Amino acid sequence: MNSFIKYIVLILAVLQSAGIKAQASNPKIITAVTVEKTDTAFGVQGLNISYSFNFSPLGNQDYIDSITKTTAYNIKTRISLKDEAVNPGYGYSAFRNTKNDFEIISHISATEIKNAKTDKNLTVFIPYAALKLPDLTNYTVTIKAALVSTVWVTEKQIQLVEQSNISFYKPETLTATLFVDSIEVTTLDSKGRAWDYSFFGKDYPDIGVAIKLSDNILWDRHINNKFLFVLNPNDKSYSFSISKNDKITVLVEDRDLLISDLIEEFKCITSDKIKGQWYSFISKSSTVKQCQIKYRIN
Protein backbone atom coordinates (compact mmCIF):
# COMPACT_ATOMS: atom_id res chain seq x y z
CA MET A 1 0.00 0.00 0.00
CA ASN A 2 1.61 3.27 -1.07
CA SER A 3 1.78 6.32 1.16
CA PHE A 4 -1.04 8.16 -0.62
CA ILE A 5 -3.49 5.28 -0.10
CA LYS A 6 -2.38 4.98 3.53
CA TYR A 7 -3.11 8.67 3.96
CA ILE A 8 -6.62 8.33 2.50
CA VAL A 9 -7.35 5.30 4.71
CA LEU A 10 -6.17 7.25 7.76
CA ILE A 11 -8.39 10.23 6.90
CA LEU A 12 -11.41 7.97 6.42
CA ALA A 13 -10.73 6.25 9.73
CA VAL A 14 -10.50 9.58 11.53
CA LEU A 15 -13.76 10.79 9.95
CA GLN A 16 -15.52 7.54 10.83
CA SER A 17 -14.24 7.76 14.39
CA ALA A 18 -15.41 11.36 14.67
CA GLY A 19 -18.82 10.37 13.35
CA ILE A 20 -19.15 7.52 15.83
CA LYS A 21 -18.06 9.80 18.65
CA ALA A 22 -20.59 12.47 17.67
CA GLN A 23 -23.34 9.91 17.39
CA ALA A 24 -22.46 8.35 20.72
CA SER A 25 -22.42 11.73 22.46
CA ASN A 26 -26.03 12.31 21.34
CA PRO A 27 -25.93 16.11 21.71
CA LYS A 28 -29.05 17.60 23.24
CA ILE A 29 -29.43 20.76 21.19
CA ILE A 30 -33.21 21.08 21.57
CA THR A 31 -33.55 21.68 25.30
CA ALA A 32 -37.29 22.26 25.73
CA VAL A 33 -40.60 21.97 23.89
CA THR A 34 -43.74 23.85 24.93
CA VAL A 35 -47.16 23.55 23.29
CA GLU A 36 -50.01 26.03 23.60
CA LYS A 37 -53.54 25.83 22.20
CA THR A 38 -54.44 29.19 20.72
CA ASP A 39 -56.76 31.10 18.42
CA THR A 40 -54.71 34.30 18.46
CA ALA A 41 -52.09 33.38 15.85
CA PHE A 42 -53.35 35.88 13.25
CA GLY A 43 -56.88 34.74 14.08
CA VAL A 44 -56.25 31.07 13.30
CA GLN A 45 -57.01 28.17 15.66
CA GLY A 46 -54.30 25.61 16.27
CA LEU A 47 -51.22 24.52 18.21
CA ASN A 48 -48.38 26.93 18.90
CA ILE A 49 -45.15 24.94 19.43
CA SER A 50 -42.05 26.62 20.81
CA TYR A 51 -38.61 25.01 20.69
CA SER A 52 -35.70 26.15 22.85
CA PHE A 53 -32.31 25.19 21.46
CA ASN A 54 -28.61 25.73 22.02
CA PHE A 55 -25.81 24.51 19.74
CA SER A 56 -23.02 24.65 22.33
CA PRO A 57 -23.05 20.81 22.83
CA LEU A 58 -21.57 20.46 19.32
CA GLY A 59 -18.25 21.93 20.39
CA ASN A 60 -16.42 25.21 20.84
CA GLN A 61 -17.45 28.41 19.08
CA ASP A 62 -14.76 28.18 16.38
CA TYR A 63 -15.92 24.72 15.38
CA ILE A 64 -19.57 25.78 15.34
CA ASP A 65 -18.69 28.79 13.16
CA SER A 66 -16.89 26.53 10.72
CA ILE A 67 -19.72 24.02 10.24
CA THR A 68 -22.27 26.71 9.37
CA LYS A 69 -20.35 27.26 6.11
CA THR A 70 -21.29 23.81 4.81
CA THR A 71 -24.10 22.51 7.03
CA ALA A 72 -27.76 23.54 7.27
CA TYR A 73 -29.94 22.69 10.26
CA ASN A 74 -33.72 22.24 10.27
CA ILE A 75 -36.36 21.14 12.74
CA LYS A 76 -38.97 18.82 11.24
CA THR A 77 -42.22 18.80 13.19
CA ARG A 78 -44.61 15.86 12.87
CA ILE A 79 -47.70 14.71 14.75
CA SER A 80 -48.77 11.19 15.64
CA LEU A 81 -52.05 9.82 16.97
CA LYS A 82 -51.92 6.44 18.72
CA ASP A 83 -48.45 5.81 17.22
CA GLU A 84 -49.74 6.53 13.70
CA ALA A 85 -48.51 9.54 11.77
CA VAL A 86 -51.16 12.15 10.99
CA ASN A 87 -51.57 13.13 7.32
CA PRO A 88 -51.98 16.69 6.03
CA GLY A 89 -55.47 18.07 5.56
CA TYR A 90 -57.12 19.17 2.33
CA GLY A 91 -55.05 21.81 0.54
CA TYR A 92 -51.94 21.36 2.72
CA SER A 93 -49.71 19.49 0.27
CA ALA A 94 -46.92 21.96 1.09
CA PHE A 95 -46.67 20.19 4.46
CA ARG A 96 -46.47 16.62 3.18
CA ASN A 97 -43.25 14.58 3.35
CA THR A 98 -42.27 11.65 1.15
CA LYS A 99 -44.27 9.26 3.36
CA ASN A 100 -47.41 11.39 2.98
CA ASP A 101 -47.16 12.40 6.65
CA PHE A 102 -47.85 15.93 7.88
CA GLU A 103 -44.52 17.72 8.37
CA ILE A 104 -43.44 21.33 8.81
CA ILE A 105 -39.77 22.09 8.16
CA SER A 106 -38.32 25.08 10.02
CA HIS A 107 -34.89 26.40 9.05
CA ILE A 108 -32.45 27.54 11.74
CA SER A 109 -30.39 30.46 10.47
CA ALA A 110 -26.59 30.54 10.63
CA THR A 111 -26.78 33.58 12.91
CA GLU A 112 -28.79 31.64 15.48
CA ILE A 113 -26.36 28.73 15.31
CA LYS A 114 -23.19 30.80 15.61
CA ASN A 115 -24.12 32.49 18.89
CA ALA A 116 -24.11 29.08 20.52
CA LYS A 117 -23.86 30.09 24.17
CA THR A 118 -27.25 31.81 24.17
CA ASP A 119 -30.51 29.86 24.20
CA LYS A 120 -32.70 30.53 21.14
CA ASN A 121 -36.36 29.97 20.44
CA LEU A 122 -38.17 28.85 17.31
CA THR A 123 -41.95 28.82 17.01
CA VAL A 124 -44.04 26.58 14.76
CA PHE A 125 -47.79 27.06 14.36
CA ILE A 126 -50.00 24.17 13.22
CA PRO A 127 -53.59 25.05 12.27
CA TYR A 128 -56.09 22.41 13.34
CA ALA A 129 -57.41 22.41 9.76
CA ALA A 130 -53.96 21.36 8.50
CA LEU A 131 -54.42 17.94 10.14
CA LYS A 132 -56.42 15.25 8.37
CA LEU A 133 -58.59 14.37 11.35
CA PRO A 134 -62.40 14.37 11.67
CA ASP A 135 -63.70 17.62 13.12
CA LEU A 136 -65.85 18.20 16.23
CA THR A 137 -63.71 15.65 18.09
CA ASN A 138 -61.27 15.62 21.01
CA TYR A 139 -57.75 14.30 20.37
CA THR A 140 -54.62 13.48 22.34
CA VAL A 141 -51.53 13.51 20.15
CA THR A 142 -47.74 13.40 20.31
CA ILE A 143 -45.52 16.12 18.85
CA LYS A 144 -42.32 14.75 17.32
CA ALA A 145 -39.47 17.08 16.44
CA ALA A 146 -36.40 15.90 14.54
CA LEU A 147 -33.31 18.10 14.39
CA VAL A 148 -31.69 17.35 11.03
CA SER A 149 -28.38 18.47 9.56
CA THR A 150 -27.88 18.66 5.80
CA VAL A 151 -24.54 18.72 3.98
CA TRP A 152 -25.19 19.20 0.28
CA VAL A 153 -28.01 16.67 -0.21
CA THR A 154 -27.16 14.28 2.62
CA GLU A 155 -29.40 14.48 5.69
CA LYS A 156 -28.61 13.19 9.16
CA GLN A 157 -30.90 13.17 12.17
CA ILE A 158 -29.07 14.69 15.12
CA GLN A 159 -31.79 14.57 17.76
CA LEU A 160 -35.40 13.44 18.16
CA VAL A 161 -37.61 14.85 20.90
CA GLU A 162 -41.23 14.05 21.69
CA GLN A 163 -43.93 15.83 23.64
CA SER A 164 -46.82 13.48 24.40
CA ASN A 165 -50.34 13.88 25.79
CA ILE A 166 -51.15 17.06 23.84
CA SER A 167 -54.94 17.33 23.99
CA PHE A 168 -57.14 19.58 21.85
CA TYR A 169 -60.60 19.81 20.37
CA LYS A 170 -60.77 20.11 16.58
CA PRO A 171 -63.52 22.60 15.70
CA GLU A 172 -65.81 22.47 12.70
CA THR A 173 -63.89 22.30 9.43
CA LEU A 174 -64.94 24.34 6.40
CA THR A 175 -63.53 24.71 2.88
CA ALA A 176 -62.20 28.04 1.62
CA THR A 177 -61.79 28.70 -2.11
CA LEU A 178 -59.84 31.68 -3.44
CA PHE A 179 -59.93 32.72 -7.08
CA VAL A 180 -56.92 34.88 -7.99
CA ASP A 181 -57.78 36.29 -11.39
CA SER A 182 -55.48 39.30 -11.77
CA ILE A 183 -53.75 42.22 -10.06
CA GLU A 184 -52.43 45.27 -11.87
CA VAL A 185 -50.13 47.83 -10.28
CA THR A 186 -49.13 51.36 -11.22
CA THR A 187 -45.95 52.07 -13.18
CA LEU A 188 -44.35 53.67 -10.09
CA ASP A 189 -44.35 52.59 -6.45
CA SER A 190 -45.98 54.47 -3.56
CA LYS A 191 -43.01 56.86 -3.37
CA GLY A 192 -43.13 57.69 -7.06
CA ARG A 193 -40.06 55.62 -7.89
CA ALA A 194 -39.45 52.72 -10.22
CA TRP A 195 -40.33 49.40 -8.60
CA ASP A 196 -36.93 47.89 -9.36
CA TYR A 197 -33.69 49.10 -10.87
CA SER A 198 -32.14 47.00 -13.58
CA PHE A 199 -29.03 47.63 -15.66
CA PHE A 200 -30.04 45.26 -18.43
CA GLY A 201 -33.79 44.81 -18.12
CA LYS A 202 -36.90 46.80 -17.32
CA ASP A 203 -37.74 48.46 -14.01
CA TYR A 204 -40.92 46.44 -13.60
CA PRO A 205 -42.01 44.80 -10.34
CA ASP A 206 -41.81 41.08 -9.64
CA ILE A 207 -45.33 40.58 -8.29
CA GLY A 208 -45.84 37.71 -5.86
CA VAL A 209 -49.12 36.55 -4.33
CA ALA A 210 -49.30 34.22 -1.32
CA ILE A 211 -52.26 32.69 0.51
CA LYS A 212 -51.51 32.27 4.21
CA LEU A 213 -53.12 30.79 7.29
CA SER A 214 -51.30 32.39 10.20
CA ASP A 215 -47.65 32.38 9.08
CA ASN A 216 -48.02 29.20 7.01
CA ILE A 217 -47.91 29.75 3.25
CA LEU A 218 -50.34 27.39 1.50
CA TRP A 219 -50.17 28.78 -2.06
CA ASP A 220 -47.56 31.03 -3.64
CA ARG A 221 -47.11 32.34 -7.17
CA HIS A 222 -45.05 35.13 -8.71
CA ILE A 223 -44.54 36.72 -12.11
CA ASN A 224 -41.36 38.65 -12.91
CA ASN A 225 -41.09 41.99 -14.69
CA LYS A 226 -44.79 42.68 -15.18
CA PHE A 227 -47.23 45.35 -14.04
CA LEU A 228 -50.04 42.84 -14.49
CA PHE A 229 -50.18 39.63 -12.45
CA VAL A 230 -52.32 37.06 -14.25
CA LEU A 231 -52.06 33.26 -14.22
CA ASN A 232 -53.20 30.61 -16.66
CA PRO A 233 -56.84 29.55 -16.13
CA ASN A 234 -55.93 26.23 -14.49
CA ASP A 235 -53.88 27.91 -11.77
CA LYS A 236 -56.21 30.68 -10.60
CA SER A 237 -58.32 28.75 -8.09
CA TYR A 238 -57.13 27.21 -4.82
CA SER A 239 -59.17 25.41 -2.13
CA PHE A 240 -58.14 24.34 1.36
CA SER A 241 -59.55 23.48 4.77
CA ILE A 242 -60.00 26.03 7.53
CA SER A 243 -61.52 25.86 10.98
CA LYS A 244 -64.74 27.77 11.47
CA ASN A 245 -63.97 31.47 12.09
CA ASP A 246 -60.32 31.25 10.96
CA LYS A 247 -58.91 34.34 9.24
CA ILE A 248 -57.19 34.06 5.84
CA THR A 249 -54.44 36.38 4.63
CA VAL A 250 -53.60 37.17 1.00
CA LEU A 251 -50.22 38.87 0.67
CA VAL A 252 -49.24 40.81 -2.47
CA GLU A 253 -45.60 41.91 -2.72
CA ASP A 254 -42.94 43.16 -5.07
CA ARG A 255 -40.50 40.30 -4.60
CA ASP A 256 -36.79 40.98 -4.16
CA LEU A 257 -33.90 38.74 -3.15
CA LEU A 258 -33.26 40.48 0.16
CA ILE A 259 -36.37 42.41 1.19
CA SER A 260 -39.76 42.28 -0.53
CA ASP A 261 -41.92 45.41 -0.66
CA LEU A 262 -45.53 45.17 0.47
CA ILE A 263 -48.12 46.10 -2.15
CA GLU A 264 -51.29 44.96 -0.39
CA GLU A 265 -52.36 42.65 2.42
CA PHE A 266 -55.93 41.38 2.40
CA LYS A 267 -57.55 39.92 5.51
CA CYS A 268 -60.50 37.58 5.09
CA ILE A 269 -62.63 37.38 8.23
CA THR A 270 -64.69 34.25 7.67
CA SER A 271 -66.91 34.34 10.74
CA ASP A 272 -69.57 36.59 9.17
CA LYS A 273 -69.59 35.12 5.66
CA ILE A 274 -72.59 33.36 4.09
CA LYS A 275 -71.65 29.86 2.99
CA GLY A 276 -71.35 29.47 -0.77
CA GLN A 277 -71.45 33.19 -1.53
CA TRP A 278 -68.57 34.84 -3.39
CA TYR A 279 -66.90 37.92 -1.86
CA SER A 280 -64.36 40.23 -3.53
CA PHE A 281 -61.32 41.86 -1.97
CA ILE A 282 -61.28 45.67 -2.27
CA SER A 283 -57.81 47.16 -2.52
CA LYS A 284 -56.95 50.26 -0.49
CA SER A 285 -53.45 50.58 -1.92
CA SER A 286 -52.63 53.60 -4.09
CA THR A 287 -50.37 51.40 -6.20
CA VAL A 288 -53.05 48.88 -7.20
CA LYS A 289 -54.88 49.89 -10.40
CA GLN A 290 -57.23 46.93 -10.36
CA CYS A 291 -57.64 43.77 -8.33
CA GLN A 292 -59.73 40.72 -9.20
CA ILE A 293 -59.50 38.34 -6.24
CA LYS A 294 -62.57 36.71 -4.76
CA TYR A 295 -63.28 34.00 -2.18
CA ARG A 296 -66.04 31.90 -0.69
CA ILE A 297 -66.49 29.64 2.33
CA ASN A 298 -68.33 26.30 2.13
Image (cartoon, rainbow, N blue to C red):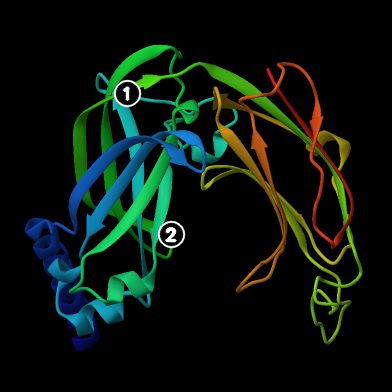
Residue 12 appears left or right of 123:
left
Mark 2 lies on a secondary structure that is loop
Q: Amino acid at mark 2?
A: Val
The quadrant of the picture occupied by the N terminus is bottom left
Give above or below for 202 relative to 19.
below
Residue 166 appears left or right of 247:
left
* Label 2 crowd (10 A; few <14 / some 14-19 / many >=20): few
The quadrant of the picture occupied by the C terminus is top right
Residue named by callout 1 = 168
Q: Residue at x 17, y 64 (%)?
A: 19
Q: Residue at x 43, y 43 (%)?
A: 104
C-alpha gap between disc 2 and disc 1: 37 Å
**Which numbered mark, 2 or 1, is in the foreground of this view?**
1
Q: Residue at x 24, y 76 (%)?
A: 64
Residue 212 appears left or right of 166:
right
Q: Residue at x 27, y 35 (%)?
A: 143
Q: Amino acid at mark 1?
A: Phe
Name the one closer to the observer, 79 or 41: 41
Q: Please tell me the numbered disc located at residue 153.
A: 2
Name the one closer to the observer, 154 or 165: 165
Give residue 109's quadrant in the image. Answer: bottom left
Give above or below for 188 relative to 84.
below
* Label 1 crowd (10 A; few <14 / some 14-19 / many >=20): some
Give residue 155's quadrant in the image. Answer: bottom left
Give above or below for 132 relative to 257.
above
Give residue 170's quadrant in the image. Answer: top left
